[in-house]
Structure formats: structure tokens, C-alpha cells
Image (tube, grey):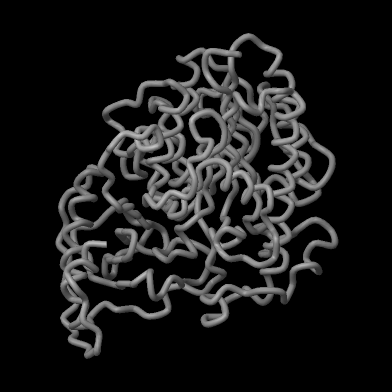
Amino acid sequence: MKSHPNVIVFFTDQQRWDTSGLHGNPLGLTPNFDRMARSGTHIDASITCQPVCGPARSSLQTGLYATQTGVWKNFIPLDPGLKTLARYYNEAGYQTGYIGKWHLGTPEGAVPVEERGGYRKWLAANLLEFVSDAYDCVLFDEENRQVKLPGYRVDAMTDAAIRHIDEASKQENPFFLFLSYLEPHHQNHLDDYPPPRGYREAYTGKWTPPDLQALGGSSGQHLGGYYGMVKRLDEALGRIQDALHSLDIEKETIILFTSDHGCHFKTRNDEYKRSCHEASVRVPTAFSGPGFAGGGRRTEVMSLVDLVPTLLDASGIKVPEEMPGRSLMPRLRGQDQPWEQEALIQISESQTGRAIRTARWKYAVVAPDQDGKAGPGADLYEEDCLYDLESDPYELQNLIGYASHKPVAEHLRSKLLAAMKRAGEPKPEIRINQEAKKSQRKVTRQEILQ
């Protein structure tokens, strides 16, 4: 057995948390993910720190917030001087490889070596949605030569990943593979979610989450295809798991399954993400392999920036002090480590916004009259929404301005400002919502702190 575990990051794009059977989806879309989460460690409340592709990816590659990486909106390349997952694993003697969508470089297709984040093996495209299609998988190799892979795009990339794993498993050093799918992201030029043939029909009209039932959006048109894409991704996960089993390296390989953000199907703004709501920010996440077996369903609220130190720690790599996130490993090892139940969310492009998500509450502010593409932050924000996730998990009743919930907003406002400070942001002014809507509800001090 090698001195360090192998590591695979199975990364999807725009996948809602409630596509998983563990989160109540009744369609059986994710049996492999569900089994992995049950036997390993399931992060029940996994929250992206930035609900849009490039910024979220910059955070997962570095363990830093998007305002710290400088990639606070799409189409800003990742600073080549930043230390990435690849560089941490390179230093630890790993074979590092990347397959799939990058979205942290400057061109649409082939990515220059200096923009690859330090990954040594490479088969990827920067904007995969622009240079490929569902049945036209186009990637670029280490020499920036175009490579066309046969089959449905998920399958083509999975075939490439299994070949990579097979070859890497024969080497002396452990491997780190970041496998980054486009699915279930929409195909931009079609504004559609193209699944494998026959899969759309299997899931159209079957089950619609409560927020989409209430708010409409494009889910009637798109949900069947979206679910079909999720189903094929889960089948790909099963194929990766089977490959590890057949190579007899399953027990010495960590898998992290997660996504960059979710999808609200044009219910919260005029596209699919870039909002503070659970549909945008909550994603399915689980770990399996050494250190994670039997971890069970975790109640800790975790951000993308927490996944990075957790992964490094589990791999035997020292976690840098400058990382704002927290490793879950001490708690999995039975240590009595305190855990602040919160995740900071930074929002750009659709708005300049900030939110704090606790185990019970969601509180969000928005910069008034500021273009979300104008800058990474603002000096002034206004209270925008407050949700009780225990009684209203799909966020259909905004409680901001209710007199009964003013103490909750006050508490969360202070938590948000403190979290922004830890993320390196200057302290802004938050303009308080002065409405006094009436409610029979009385919130207890114990509830406020949840």
C-alpha cells in the first residue's frame, strides 16, 4: 500500500442538492452517490461560497474565497502564483491530473500550461460548454492538441478517467485526479439540458421540487433533461467505483463528490444560479475512502472552502494556516473540536450580494443600484431576505422586516459582518429593513442561535 491515499475529486456542474435520494428525491437518480454517502461521510448541508462557475472553482482549487483569489466573477483567469490543490499534491509526491472543464483560464478551448494550476497530466477545455456538445466531446491534451472522444460527453470523460486511473495505479506514487464534468449544466447555445437519448422521456413530468412547483421558471421545459443528466453522472460514479474495485485500490482511494453550485431554473432571477437561495448554493457532497468510512450524515454546515482543508488533512498534507476554511477530519477522528455552524456566500454578476447560512437560518443583503459585474464588493448593502430553513426549506416565505424576526436578523447581521471580515473584506454598512410586519410567531433566544 502507498504511504498516502489516492484522491479523486468527482466534480459536477450546477447540480442541486435535492437530486439525491438522501435529500428526498423519489426518482432513484443517485443510487451510487447515496450508497457512497451512507457508507462514507455525507455532508448534509454543503454550501457553495460563490454560486457561479469560475469563482466557485477558484475557491475549490485554492481553499480561498473568490474575493481572495481575485476570481470574483466569470472570465477572470486564476492567478498562476496562487497555490492550488495540484501544487499541494505535487509537493507531497502525487501524480496530479485534470480531466474536463477548467473555467479558470483565458481561452475557450486549449489552456496554456501556465494557466493550468500546476496539474501535470491534462485533458481538458477551459469553457467546455462552448467547444463541445452532448455527443461531441472535445478536449485538449498536454500539448494543446484537440482530442475528440466518442460517446455521450459524460461517458467519454469517464472512459478517459478510467484509463488515467488504470495507468496511474501502476506507478509508485499515489495519484490525485480532478475529474470535472460539465453536466448537469445547460448547453449554452441551445439553452437546454441535453441528456443521453431516451433519458429525458424517462423523467419528464415525474417530480418537481416545491420551490419550482410554486415559482415556475423553466423547470417544466428543462427538468426531465436535467434529471437525465444527473442519472448518467451517477452511473459514471458507479463506473469509477467499479474501476477502483477491480484494480483493488478502492480501500486506499478517497473520493470527494461535490458540485460548484445548484440550479434554480429561472425562478430567482433571469437565469439559473447567482442567488443566495438553497437551489443555487446547496449541493450534494460526500466523501468515501480512508478516513471517511462510517462518518455518517454530518450536521456541520460546510462551505467549499472547508472541503479543501478536509481533503488535504485526510491525505496527510499539512493544512496552511492562511486558509479560511476548516478541516472536518479532527471531528471525524473523535476530537472535540468546536465548529461554527455557518457558511459565507458571496454573490456577483446578477447582483453584488452577501449571505450567511447557518444550520437554521439564511440571511442575505444586496448592494442597491450596483451592477453585479462592477466590482467584487460594496461599501453599502441593504437587507434583502431572511429564511427559516427548518420550517421553510425551499425558501418560499421571506421573513425580512417581520417584527417577530428582528432579533434573528440582528444576530445574523453581526455574524455576516464577522464572516466578511475573516474573508478579508472591508467592513461595509448594512442598511436595516425598517418594516414591522406583524406575525403571531415569537422566536426564542435558543432558536435565534441555531
* Any part of residue 145 in sight: yes
Q: With respect to residue 26, does 404 lie above or below?
A: below
Q: Nearer the viewer, residue 351 or 221?
A: 221
> x and y percent of residue 382 in the render?
23, 70
> Which residue is at 66% across, 23% downward?
142
- Image position of 251 (left or right of 166): left
> x and y percent of residue 347 in the render?
37, 57
> Which residue is at 74% across, 52% downward?
232
Q: Nearer the viewer, residue 338 or 117?
A: 338
Q: With respect to residue 339, does 62 lie above or below?
A: above
> x and y percent of residue 224 in the render?
72, 68
How many numbered marks, from 0 up? 0
> Which residue is at 72% across, 42% downward?
238
> Which residue is at 68% across, 59% downward?
189
- The quarter of the picture where the C terminus appears is bottom left
- Image position of 335 (left or right of 299): left
- Image position of 187 (left or right of 421): right
Q: With respect to residue 178, does 135 lie above or below?
A: below
Q: Quadrant of residue 209?
A: bottom right
> Among all residues in the image, which is located at the extreme top?
172
- The quarter of the picture where the N terminus appears is top right
Q: Nearer the viewer, residue 338 or 13?
A: 338
* Any part of residue 84 in sight: no
Q: Nearer the viewer, residue 193 or 441?
A: 441
> x and y percent of residue 273 in the render?
49, 62
